[in-house]
Image (spheres, rainbow, N blue to C red):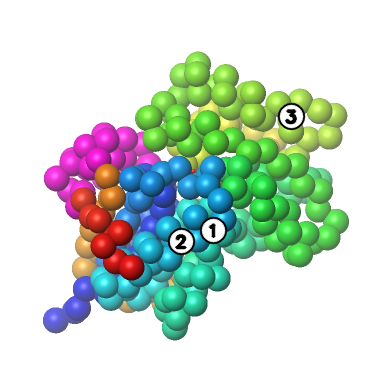
């Protein structure tokens, strides 16, 4: 009998479901355990030390599920805690969001100008700029922190005039200039829900990089056959289920989501 040895995926909330979706598209037979830290969201405004502490805590909790790999489906946690989670989970493979998205952007850009939108924590760290320039020092990078989009995504407001106005306000400093990026990294797992609006506002000449989709390509050699998915949250399964459909094409109800206390694990 196959033992339950899932790919463990964690995020600060429901946004990481966009990564789980990409993983399931690639490996539908694989089993997954997803943990959204809804009790402590947002991560994007918190200090690197706090995000690292929370991430280590989630990793320790998930190690109890006998995972075969860990995916940090949160750009902010990937920014501050990739090394810490790798050290804790070794020898398991740990995939973060930053490197794959930077590599995809450098591959895609034709004018050598890449835009990055992410949480304040990710932008302040300068991690995308460092990664992009490590791959190609000639790349020009324009960055913008967009924390309000996380709140809109968690609220389920992924379309309509408020989301559109908020996106315009954030993107104007990057795109309302003479030299605009031709590639935009959606450097937060909550942002793919706004893809239609990004396309409408930016037009077809800007390539969007979905960090979760490109990171999912890093997972290799999966051999699971059961295709089971366990979804856990640290707070409010009702709210989680109500908004999950924007990120995940499988409908969820509150009873599908296990409420867990990760703080019980030191
Ligand atoms: N999901 C997180 C990320 O990808 C952002 C949400 C938050 O602020 O917690 O960066």
Quadrant of the rendering where the C terminus is positioned: bottom left
Dot 2 falls on a residue whose secondary structure is: helix
Q: Is the residue under label 1 in contact with that under label 3 (CB below 8 Å)? A: no
Asked if residue 184 shows in the view, the reply is no
Q: Does the residue labelled 1 lie within 8 Å of ligand 1?
A: no
Q: Does the residue labelled 3 lie within 8 Å of ligand 1?
A: no
Quadrant of the rendering where the N terminus is positioned: bottom left
Q: Does the residue labelled 2 lie within 8 Å of ligand 1?
A: no
Q: Is the residue under label 2 in contact with that under label 1 (CB below 8 Å)? A: yes
The residues bearing labels 3 and 2 have C-alpha atoms spaced at a distance of 33 Å
Q: Which of the two discs, 3 and 1, labels the residue nearer the N terminus?
A: 1
For the magenta stretch, what is the residue range?
Answer: 236-258
**Residue 178 drawn at (x, y percent):** 85, 29
**Residue 198 drawn at (x, y percent):** 58, 31
Q: Which of the two discs, 3 and 2, labels the residue nearer the N terminus?
A: 2
The residues bearing labels 3 and 1 have C-alpha atoms spaced at a distance of 30 Å
Q: Residue at x 39, y 35 (%)?
A: 154
> Based on the displayed image, in which of its 4 quarters is residue 45 positioned?
top right
Task: Check disc 3 and report the residue beneath it.
Answer: 173
Q: Residue 27 carries which label?
A: none
Residue 94 relative to residue 80: left or right: left
Q: Which mark is residue 53?
A: 2
Instruction: Please say whether residue 246 is one of the residues in the magenta stretch.
Output: yes
The residues bearing labels 1 and 2 have C-alpha atoms spaced at a distance of 6 Å
Q: Residue 49 carries which label?
A: 1
- The crowd level at tag 2 (other Cα within 10 Å; few <14, some 14-19, many 20+) is some
**Residue 13 drawn at (x, y percent):** 38, 46
Instruction: Please say whether residue 221 is one of the residues in the magenta stretch.
Output: no
> Based on the displayed image, in which of its 4 quarters is residue 20 positioned?
bottom left
């Amino acid at each position: 009998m196959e033992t339950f040895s899932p790919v463990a995926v964690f995020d600060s909330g429901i946004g990481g479901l966009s990564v789980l979706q990409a993983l399931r598209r690639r490996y539908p037979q694989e089993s997954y355990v997803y943990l959204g830290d809804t009790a402590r969201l947002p991560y994007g405004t918190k200090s690197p030390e706090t995000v690292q502490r929370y991430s280590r805590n989630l990793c320790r909790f998930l190690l109890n599920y006998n995972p075969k790999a860990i995916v940090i489906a949160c750009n902010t946690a990937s920014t501050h805690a990739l090394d810490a989670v790798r050290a804790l989970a070794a020898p398991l493979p740990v995939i973060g969001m930053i490197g794959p998205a930077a590599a995809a952007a450098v591959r895609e850009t034709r004018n050598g100008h890449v835009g990055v939108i992410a949480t304040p924590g990710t932008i302040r760290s300068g991690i995308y700029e460092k990664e992009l320039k490590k791959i190609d020092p000639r790349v020009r990078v324009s960055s913008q922190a967009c924390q309000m989009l996380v709140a809109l995504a968690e609220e389920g407001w992924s379309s309509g005039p408020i989301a559109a106005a908020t996106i315009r306000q954030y993107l104007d400093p990057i795109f309302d200039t003479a030299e605009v990026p031709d590639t935009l990294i959606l450097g937060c797992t909550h942002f793919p829900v706004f893809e239609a609006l990004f396309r409408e506002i930016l037009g077809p000449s800007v390539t969007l990089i979905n960090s979760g989709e490109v990171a999912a390509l890093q997972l290799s050699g999966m051999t699971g056959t059961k295709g089971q998915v366990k979804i856990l949250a640290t707070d409010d399964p009702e709210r989680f289920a109500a908004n999950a459909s924007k990120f995940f094409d499988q409908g969820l109800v509150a009873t599908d989501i296990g409420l867990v206390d990760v703080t019980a694990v030191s």
